[in-house]
Amino acid sequence: MVNETDAQPDETETIPETAEDDFALGSLDFDGLSPTDFEEFCFDLISESEFTNVDWRKGTPLASSPSDRGRDIVAHKTMSDIDGHEYAERWFIDCKHYKRGVPPDALQGTIAWAVAERPSVVLFIASGYLTNGAKDWIADYERTNRPPFRIRVWEKPQLLKLVEKHLDIAFKHDVGTSTLRRVSEILAVESELMDRLWYGRKPADEDVDARGWPDDIKAGMLAAKRAVEEQYGVDELAKDVESDWAWGYLSGRISAVRWVLGDHWHNLDS
């Protein structure tokens, strides 16, 4: 029986650190991604990792990709001999998003197709780890069949090293890390701060009539104020305007969050 508990990473497949690596993520969290989302993440990561002609073989808009014919992504990588001669290797890439370790039978379809198509490399990218049974199966297959292609495996440790160099891809796909917030979290905070900034700029209810606004504008604004009060609480919203310091603190928070999201500094629109 296949043991599907998480296997330990294969140290022979780790991507070496360089002297320039002075930033390290603690972990990656792919739980919020569907299998198709994970394929798209892998496509973008491969595209930014010195591969060319990257082709995502997803042939349908459905959540699954039955038409990938044993591989999710095909890409080419330019290699160079010691004499400067360059040549392109063709890689078949299969993306495995499993909550448990990836079992041997999940690898066999890709290997069978590679035997027919003869790429240079078959790469399995796992959002977690391959099971020990899967790693033993790969080792046995290579020893007994001597395939005309190399088999590589990227598990979570290898993905961690690559994502450290391409944090924008993690942000784009809302991949969680132990040291950085998800983009969805940052957007939620920006939305709350914008609501509070908008509320703090509105006149008190008793002063609305003095503004001379049309009735529909007044009614819409008052209804929006009630909605914000219900969501955040009147007492909490009052803290934003209780002093100049509190108002400046709110303004500084939303300016900083918007800068992280790619906006200009000092954008205090509401």
Image: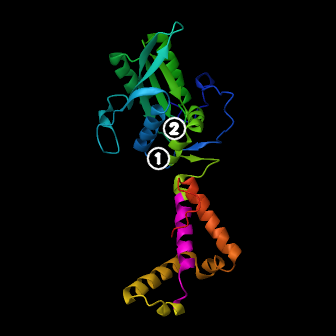
Q: Residue at x 44, y 34 (%)?
A: 95
Q: Which residues are magenta?
A: 187-205
Relative horizontal placement of residue 82, taking residue 149 as reference (left or right): right
Give the class, few, some or many, for how many residues have Cα within 10 Å of label 1's Cα (few <14, many ≥20): some
Residue type for callout 1: Leu
Q: Secondary structure at mark 2?
A: loop
Q: Residue at x 59, y 82 (%)?
A: 234
Relative horizontal placement of residue 243, taking residue 77 as reference (left or right): right
Label 1 or label 2, whichever comes before in sequence order: 1
| Residue 195 highlighted magenta (yes or no) | yes
The image quadrant that residue 164 belongs to is top right
Say if mark 1 contacts mark 2, CB within 8 Å: yes
Give the class, few, some or many, for how many residues have Cα within 10 Å of label 2's Cα (few <14, many ≥20): many
Expressed as whole percent of the image width and height from the top left, the position of residue 93 reads 42, 28
Q: Is residue 160 above or below residue 113?
A: below
The image quadrant that residue 200 belongs to is bottom right
* Residue on which disc 1 sits: 33
Residue type for callout 2: Ser
* Residue on which disc 2 sits: 127
The image quadrant that residue 167 belongs to is top right
Expressed as whole percent of the image width and height from the top left, the position of residue 96 reads 46, 35
Q: Residue at x 53, y 24 (%)?
A: 135
Residue 213 badge: none
